Image (cartoon, helix red, strand yellow):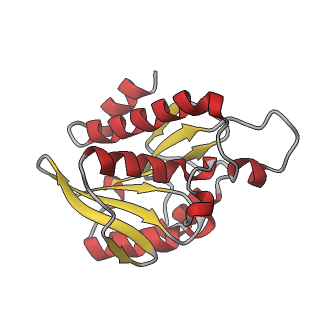
C-alpha cells in the first residue's frame, strides 16, 4: 500500500491558501480517479482506494498544519503502512511558484507541518513532494503570506505544479521513487 499525505489546514477559510497546496494535490488525484475522502479517523479525512493494482491511502490531516503528525502516525499504524511507502506533499517558500521538488528524506526546513511529521514518525526518512509557493516580495510575516491566497497571475503556475505533483505520485505507483525524482526534478 502507498500513502499520500497532503498537508494543509481544515476549513473553507484556508481552502485556497498557499499553505493548503498539499490538500490541493490530494484533491487533484481524487478528482482524476473519481474518489472521495469518505472516511474519518485519527483527526483526518481519508480514502482507501485502488489505482490500477496498487492500494492507495489518501490523507488530509484535519489537525491544522502544526500538528499534522498527530493524524499521520496513528493512521499509518492502523493500516500498517511502512514509512517508505508514504509521501508527504506540502508548500515550500524556498521554491518559486510553479516548481516542484521531490526528496527521499530531509529536515523540516522551517516547515511546522514537517516538524510535526518528523516528530511523530520518529524519522526524517520519508518521501516528500515540495511545491513552490515563493517568498513574499513585500515585508510581511511568513504566516500571513502562507495563509494568503495565490494572486490571479500565478493561477496557471499553481495549477501546473499541482498537476505535476499528482503526476509524480502516480508515476511512483509504477516505478521506484528515485526514478521518479530523476524524471520530475528537472
Q: Quadrant of residue 50?
A: bottom left
| Residue 9 at least partly seen | no
- Of residues 14 and 74, the one nearer the viewer is 14
The residue at 55%/58% (across/down) is 8
Q: Viewer-proximal residue, 65 or 158? A: 158
**Residue farthest right in this picture:** 139
- Location of residue 167 (image quadrant): top left
Image quarter where the N terminus lies is bottom left
Q: Residue at x 30, y 76 (%)?
A: 78
Check the image and report above or below for 83 versus 98: below
Counting every numbered tag in the picture gives: 0
- Please identify the residue farthest to the top as the structure is shown: 186
Residue 108: % across, % down: 61, 52
Asked if one can make out residue 20 in the rendered structure from this viewpoint, the answer is yes
Residue 2 vs 121, above or below: the answer is: above
In this rendering, would 152 be left or right of 88?
A: right
Left or right: where 51 falls relative to 22: left
Q: How far across and down, in percent of the image, does residue 138 sit?
A: 85, 36
Q: Is residue 68 left or right of residue 48?
A: right
Question: Looking at the image, which residue is at 33% across and 32% down?
Answer: 180
Q: Position of residue 175 (x, y in %)?
A: 23, 36
x, y percent for residue 168: 35, 36
Amino acid at each position: 500500500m502507498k500513502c499520500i499525505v497532503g498537508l494543509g489546514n481544515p476549513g473553507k477559510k484556508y481552502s485556497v491558501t498557499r499553505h493548503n497546496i498539499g490538500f490541493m494535490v490530494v484533491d487533484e488525484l481524487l478528482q482524476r480517479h473519481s474518489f472521495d475522502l469518505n472516511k474519518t479517523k485519527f483527526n483526518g479525512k481519508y480514502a482507501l482506494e485502488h489505482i490500477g493494482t496498487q492500494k492507495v491511502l489518501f490523507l488530509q490531516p484535519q489537525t491544522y498544519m502544526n500538528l499534522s503528525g498527530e493524524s499521520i502516525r496513528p493512521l499509518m499504524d492502523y493500516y500498517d503502512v511502512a514509512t517508505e511507502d508514504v509521501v508527504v506533499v506540502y508548500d515550500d517558500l524556498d521554491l518559486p511558484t510553479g516548481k516542484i521538488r521531490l526528496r527521499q528524506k530531509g529536515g523540516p526546513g522551517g516547515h511546522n507541518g514537517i516538524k510535526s511529521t518528523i516528530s511523530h514518525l520518529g524519522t526524517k526518512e520519508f518521501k516528500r513532494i515540495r511545491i513552490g509557493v515563493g517568498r513574499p516580495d513585500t515585508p510581511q510575516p511568513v504566516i500571513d503570506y502562507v495563509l494568503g491566497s495565490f494572486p490571479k497571475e500565478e493561477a496557471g503556475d499553481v495549477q501546473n505544479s499541482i498537476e505535476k505533483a499528482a503526476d509524480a505520485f502516480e508515476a511512483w505507483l509504477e516505478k521506484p521513487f528515485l526514478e521518479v525524482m530523476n524524471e520530475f526534478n528537472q
